[in-house]
Image (cartoon, rainbow, N blue to C red):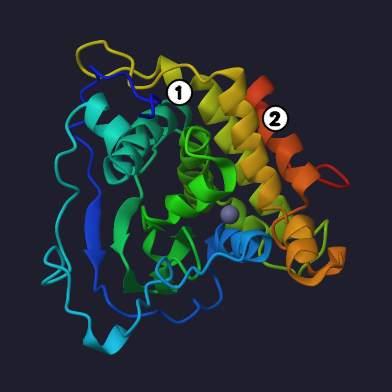
Amino acid sequence: MLMTFNPDADVSDNNVQRRGRGGRTAAIAGGGVVGLGAVVVMLISAFTGVDLTGFLGGGTDPGSQSQPQSTGSGEGTVQNCNTGTDANNSVDCRVAATSLVLNKYWTAHVKGYVKPEQVSVDVATSTPCGTASNDVGPFYCPSDQTVYIDPTFFALLHQQFGAEAGDLAQVYVVAHEYGHHIQNLIGTMAKYPNNGTGPTSNGVRTEVQADCYAGAFIADMATQKDKNGNAYMTKPTEAQIKDALDAAAAVGDDHIQQASGGYTNPESWTHGSSAQRQAWFASGYKNGLGQCDTFSVATP
Ligand SMILES: [Zn+2]
């Protein structure tokens, strides 16, 4: 069992919607998305040869699959998610509870903070940024200020990093997407719009800053408390931090390119190299939010 959460913590006031349609493979999302994850799917495929069609939502015969019971209208909330024990036991609840703690953290650090919407994707759902599914992985859509995550995505991370290793990597992924929400809220995205790809592009700077924000949150996550004064989360161990860093490295563009094509072309980077992502995560983790200015340095 994963132990990221204090078993006694009250996480009942999480507010994540369950939305989706189930049963068919989604199209790749269009532009404007700031995501993390399709790369992981590619990576795992490249390294292990695992058939991911199940994770990708297709099944053996998409046309014959019935709608999951939970969808119907496609609306609902994450069920049975009241305590830290629930969060430790269920990935759906863990994602929702992580978001609850992230909102507390950012409320304390950003004046006038407004929570993003968050959708727990059930296989696939349409968004203003294109279809959300494990084909594209978790992402934040700026235009509707919503984080989209299918919790089954983390099974892919577990396969990559090991069953015990995955818990903090999950927190890292959710925190990275919240980092994009912050960038949207405080005007970073507007100030540094997409200007193409490459290692010094605004895109890479935006991505590694979200990694830095995730590191800062993880360093502080054990200090956030519920209404009874119980800490929501436990302090990460060195081993967990290493795992989160491994996750950051594995989703670096150079790593993906080598895994998928055997070459490295920095000009096409949009997320940053493995070393960049690890370094900025570590900067936030060690030094806090004040050391996350990825835009003023010559090379992030
Ligand atoms: Zn991102």
Please report the residue visible at 31 percent of the width from the left and 62 percent of the height from the top: 121
Residue at the bottom extreme of this rendering: 63
Please report the residue visible at 84 percent of the width from the left and 42 percent of the height from the top: 297
The C terminus lies in which quarter of the figure?
Answer: top right
Q: Position of residue 256 (x, y in %)?
A: 72, 61
Q: Which mark is residue 153?
A: none
- 92 in relation to 5, above or below: below
> In screen coordinates, is 19 left or right of 1?
left
Q: Which mark is residue 221?
A: 1
- 54 in relation to 152, above or below: below
Q: Report which quarter residue 119 is drawn in.
A: bottom left
Q: Position of residue 152 (x, y in %)?
A: 37, 55
Q: Position of residue 226 (x, y in %)?
A: 26, 19
For the residue marked with disc 1, what is the amino acid? Answer: Met
**Which residue lies under the disc numbered 2?**
282
Q: Report which quarter residue 233 is drawn in.
A: top left
The N terminus lies in which quarter of the figure?
Answer: top left
Precedes in sequence: disc 2 or disc 1: 1
Q: Looking at the image, can residue 288 be seen? A: no
